[in-house]
Structures are given as structure tokens and as C-alpha cells.
Image (tube, grey):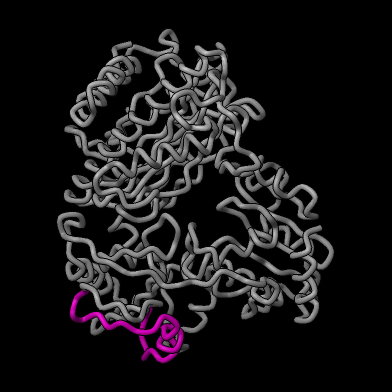
Amino acid sequence: MRQEILKLREKMKEQGVDFYIVPTTDYHGSEYVHEFFHCREFLSGFTGSAGDLLVGMDDAWLWTDGRYFIQAAMQLEGSGIKLMKYGEPGVPTLDEHLKEVVGQDMVVGFDGRVINCAVGRDLEGNFNIRWNIDLVNEVWENRPQITPSEIYSLQMEVTGESSEQKLRRIRNYMKDNEIDYHLITSLEDIAWLFNLRGSDVKHTPVFYAYALISMDFTFLYLMNENFTGDIPEEVMIRPYSQVFEDLSKLPRGTIMVNEDLASYAIVKSVSSNVEVFNAINPSEIMKALKNDKEVESTRIAHLKDGAAMVEFIHWLKTTMKFTSMLGIPGMGVGIDTGMTEIAASDYLEVCRRRQEGFMDLSFDTISGYGPNGAIVHYCATPETDRELKAEGFLLVDSGAHYKEGTTDITRTIALGVLTDRMKEDYTTVLKAHIAVARAEFAPGTMGAEIDKLARKPLLERKMNYNHGTGHGVGHLLSVHEGPQSISPRGSKYGFYEGMITSNEPGYYLEGEYGIRLENEVLCIRKPDGMLGFESITFCPFEREAILKEMLTEDELAWINDYHWQVYDKLSPMLDENLRRWLAEACAEL
């Protein structure tokens, strides 16, 4: 049993709390958070980016999704915490489980600042709750603190729209819907609205803030109270925590809040004279529909990223070929690589940093060789860092922020000899990728319908994958953004022209290897009025892993056309040696 859980139970007993909930988020409903908010990780030892922990006086449970089943099982071993696999048959949700184990006189506790309002209201309606206690803070010695980062402005050549224009659009929406106030808690929405960026969260260029908008004022609540950058004259900077008091003093009216993102605590602070209207933030949709400048800028970022990927893959394959020829697999020859998962990841970062305008990685690189590639969101550590050999697959999921935009790409790289099964599985995943890339659909089509196209080639071979097929990608913002998604649960908001989304089907054979192939795709309008996708990521797929006989004529035409585009767009950015290699990698199948 983890000592952190035992210490938490002592505090629970002192406070008269029988069950305590610890989610994986911050005060703003974010997916990626500052280390200050790694409470679930601190208590459980599970390091994945998604999961909810429930601690009782005798038992503890952790819920996570299919991306992390393998990882969580390993990291929770011996912790006394039971793994609950979200979406698996017979596994209750956290809410369902609470209804089974919480007695009539028992108390459920949580920090209302990190539980979203929708969940908080449900808990309030079913249990005796204590929502204003942060018990983790009482047991977490030397908890990391937030030092507000420098906030900087983006130029119109990248954003394509001024903050004044965006605020005008927000107010038009409020007027049309008879809304007096609009509270924005999403960090990505605030950064987009004001054309500002920061670095309060690792690899996500946001800053901790709230925004409150009426027809007469715009308040921006910042941790960095010394910010004096380029913002509209009407915007008033206020202390970060002042938002709670200001909400409690609002005159009578209606306030629009997204209760799936806003915390229970902040909505509870709204004056009783003000009616809360729960709705998706209009900025969520506005920022998902990229304007021409954002698209143009993002295309440039992907060309730079493609050049970096080509340099990396060429280096990796060349180095592995040298070691194989000398009969010393895994030993660096001529180049001090170390030839491990981490060494490969580090070199890819070097390649990206060479590109003009590189700012940061867009997330921690996933570099998984062999069995580690089957762990969907694997993160190599010195303890798990596998030696690379001149055989099998290395799965590399990575991305970057450039001054022009954000990238996210996955390639499964053949390091040497592949089995027939590996080639069959790789080609099947490629067929799934092509199915999405070639999809045509009506405006407003839900991602769940597109997801079916991706899974069809896999299900025909009794294969599948336990994660979504695609997520929205921000523009110099979070690499995971909505509201659109391609997944079995992607039915909240449809697809429209201008959305940028990932296309990343996969297959994972536990204990052996993983395969994932990811491009970013732009939703475009076809001449007939239907919508489709344009791939804006450029990097070759693995020729030696593709079984041509498994592809239809249309699929073969797509891959050959895609590879022609890869060479045409990237070759001018490369030296002669890399151009020759890329020509071979992109030669017609």
C-alpha cells in the first residue's frame, strides 16, 4: 500500500470524509496541467495523462481509458489501488461505483476547484458532499508551485484576426442569445481570444487565467499581474483569484458557462441573482474553424516538421544499418547515439530544434520499441529505456510548436527485419488511415461515423484499437483540442470546413509491438459541396512494411500520390544526401 494513500486517509478521517475523489485536471478543466496539479499521480504513482482516483477508508480505485490499461496495470502493482478500465464490459463508471459503495450517512469529499460543474452537480444531487477541501495539499510535502510565465502576443500574420474582432464575434453571439455575461475558464480559449501565449504548462503555450465578458466590460484575470502586453484598450487586468468575488457581486442577468470545463467551485460562486446558462463556449467552435491565415501558417509548420522527421528517420535507419552490418546490434557506431528509445527521441528533438522558428515540443515524445510500442501512450524512462535492434518496429509519436503552428505526427519505423505478421498488420493500419484520408461526408457529420471507416479494415481481420482515431489540434495551442473528434464517442459536435484533426488508427499486440500511423488533416469543401480531408503532414510511410497486394487500386493510388507530394514539398528543404534517400522512400509502389 502506498504511504501517500495512508496519509490521505488520516486526513479524511480528521475531516469526516469517507470517500475522496482526485481527478486529473486543474482549475480550468485542462488535459495538460502544471506539476502543481499532478495530485492523482502523486497519490497513485500512475503517470498517465488521464485518470480518476477514488480513495475510501479501506479500498482505492483508479479509472483510466484504453490508452493506459497496460501502463496503469504495471504502475499500480502493489499499490493497493484497483484498476478500473473505462468502457470495458462489466466495469462501472466512477459515478456508478459510488452509488454502490457509499452508504446513506457517508460523506464524499473533493476539491471543488478541480471537479467540473457538471460532475459536481451530479455528486451534490446523490451524496452528502464536502467540496471545499484540498486534502492532497495537506499531505503533499514540497508540492511544486506555479511561477507565472511571461505572456507574449501573437502577430496578425499568424492569427489572421485581431482580439478586438474576436471579442466582437463573442458579443454578437451573446446578443443573439440574450446573454448578459460570459465566463471563460478554458486556458486555450482565453489564449486564442486575446492572441496571447505563455508557458505555465509544459509543452502547451497557455497561461493561467479567467475571462469575464459583458456588453460593457472585459475582465482578464491573470496570475501574472505584471503583464503589460498588447491587448485591446477595453480589457482590464485583474488578480487571478479576484474572479470569485467579482462573480459573487454580479448584477441580475444571465451568465453563459461551459459546465463541462468550468469548475464546480467557480460556478457555485456566481451570484444567486444571476441565472447560469450552460453551453459550449462559442470560442471553442470559433478557434476550431481555422481561418485562411491560420491554415497557411500551419502548413508552413508542417513542412518544417516533415523536414525534421526525414532527417531523423534517415539517421535512425542509417545508424541501425551500420550496427547490423558489423554484427553489433544496439551499439552506436561512428555516431554517439546510445541507440535506445530515449536516444532516438532526443535526436528527433535535435532535428526539430534545427528548424527556424522552433519553439517547443507539443508533448513529450512517445518512443516505444518492440513491446513498449504496444503501450499506447508509453513514455520511456531510464528504467524502461529499451535498446534498439536492427529488427522490428519503433513507434514514434511526436510533435512541435513552431512560430507558425502546432504539429502532431506518428510513424512506425522499420529498424530492420520484419515478420510477415508485422507487414500484414502495418498494411491493415495503413488501409484504415487511408479510409479516413479519402472520406467524403456532409457538413455536420459526426466523428463517430468517420471512426467506423477507420475500424472497418481492422475489424475484418479481427483487429481493433482502444483509443480514438482523431482529435482536434490547436493553432499554437494544445495539441489535443475539440470540440470535434473522430472516435466512437465523437457525437457532440460535427465536422466543418477549416477544422484540423489528427488521423491516427493503430494496432497493438501486447508484449510484441505497436503500430500507429498519424497525419494531421484539414477539413476541406469538395467541388460537389461535400466535405473531405486534405493531409497536411508530410513524411513517408514504410515501404518495406507495406504489402502491395493487400491494397486496392484506389488505396495504392492514394499512397503513391501522397508520397509524390511528400517528395515534391520536402525535397527543396533538404541536402542532396537526404533528397536521394527521400526519393527512394517515396518511389512509386
> Residue 383 vs residue 223: left or right?
right
> Which sits in the foreground, 439 or 243?
243
> Residue 85 vs residue 499: left or right?
right
Most extreme residue toward the front is 334
Most extreme residue toward the right is 58
* Quadrant where the C terminus is found in the figure: top left
Question: In this picture, is 396 found above or below 247?
Answer: above
Q: Is residue 78 visible?
A: yes
> Residue 403 vs residue 519: left or right?
left
* Tally of numbered tags: 0
Residue 231's x, y, as percent?
22, 74
> Residue 29 vs residue 508: left or right?
left
Residue 297's x, y, as percent?
21, 47
> Which sits in the foreground, 121 or 158?
158
* Quadrant where the N terminus is found in the figure: bottom right
Most extreme residue toward the top is 549
Report if residue 234 lies within the magenta region.
yes
Q: Is residue 482 visible?
A: no
Q: Residue at x 47, y 38 (%)?
A: 345
Quarter of the image where one finds residue 9: bottom right
Residue 490's x, y, as percent?
45, 46
Residue 422's x, y, as percent?
55, 17
Q: Residue at x 26, y 83 (%)?
A: 217
What is the span of residues highlighted in magenta in the rendered image? 231-255
Question: In this picture, is 491 found above or below 112?
Answer: above
Report if residue 525 lies within the magenta region.
no
